[in-house]
Amino acid sequence: MAQILMNLFWIVVGIVITRVLDKPIERLQRRLIYRCRSILARLRSGENSTVTQDEFRLGKWRVPWVVVDGSSSDPYAPSNLICQLDPRPLSLPADRQSKKEQIEIAQARIAEVDGRREFHNGPTVALAGIGRGQIGVAEDSLLILRLRHLITTHIWQQH
């Protein structure tokens, strides 16, 4: 009888300890696994690569991006995205225009030396406005992007 009570006592103690320490032990285990994986990942990669969530990368280009509307759970279908090109030119502020001209000059020099360009300085459009719409109550939403041409100097064509 004493043996049964002793076994019952240890079963109750085990249940209490499991309930009390279950979450902290699980958190500690997750932290340990995360640290081990991150150390292994650093050892595997020769360079320190950082992951950014708000950046679009294409080759050497790195451009910050912003979510205009929609989500991954409710994305816009291509048929519900309308791009309108406004024919009126849009001019850049003076500081941005001078920076754009500096980039165009640098790219023209790269084109002269290497025979190729790293960036395209052709027609550029800017986002002038965003419109949202919906036809009827049950219809999908529309996203309307209004774009305007930027006035460019085309320095790269002069060289």
Image: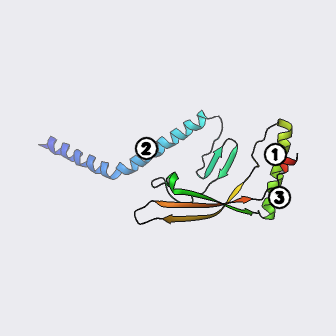
Q: Which residue is mark 1?
A: 107
User: Can the viewer see residue 80 in this picture?
Assistant: yes
The mark nearer the N terminus, 1 or 3, is 3
Front-most of 108 and 27?
A: 108
Give how far across and how far down residue 67 sits, in percent.
57, 57
Q: Which quarter of the figure has residue 146?
A: bottom right
Q: Secondary structure at mark 2?
A: helix
Front-most of 42 and 136?
A: 136
Question: Could you tell me the amino acid type at mark 1?
Answer: Gln
Q: Which quarter of the figure has residue 7?
A: top left
Nearer the viewer's eye, disc 1 or disc 2? 1
The mark nearer the N terminus, 1 or 2, is 2
Front-most of 60 and 129?
A: 129
Q: Residue at x 11, y 43 (%)?
A: 1
Is 83 placed left or right of 155 in the picture?
A: left
Q: Which residue is mark 2?
A: 29
Q: CA distance from mark 3 to mark 2?
A: 55 Å
Q: Which residue is mark 3?
A: 98
Badge number at residue 97: none
Report if the CB atoms under discs 1 and 3 are less than 8 Å apart.
Answer: no
Give how far across and how far down residue 65 sits, in percent.
62, 54
Q: CA distance from mark 1 to mark 2?
A: 52 Å
Q: Residue at x 52, y 42 (%)?
A: 35
Question: Could you tell me the amino acid type at mark 3?
Answer: Ser
Front-most of 23 and 138?
A: 138
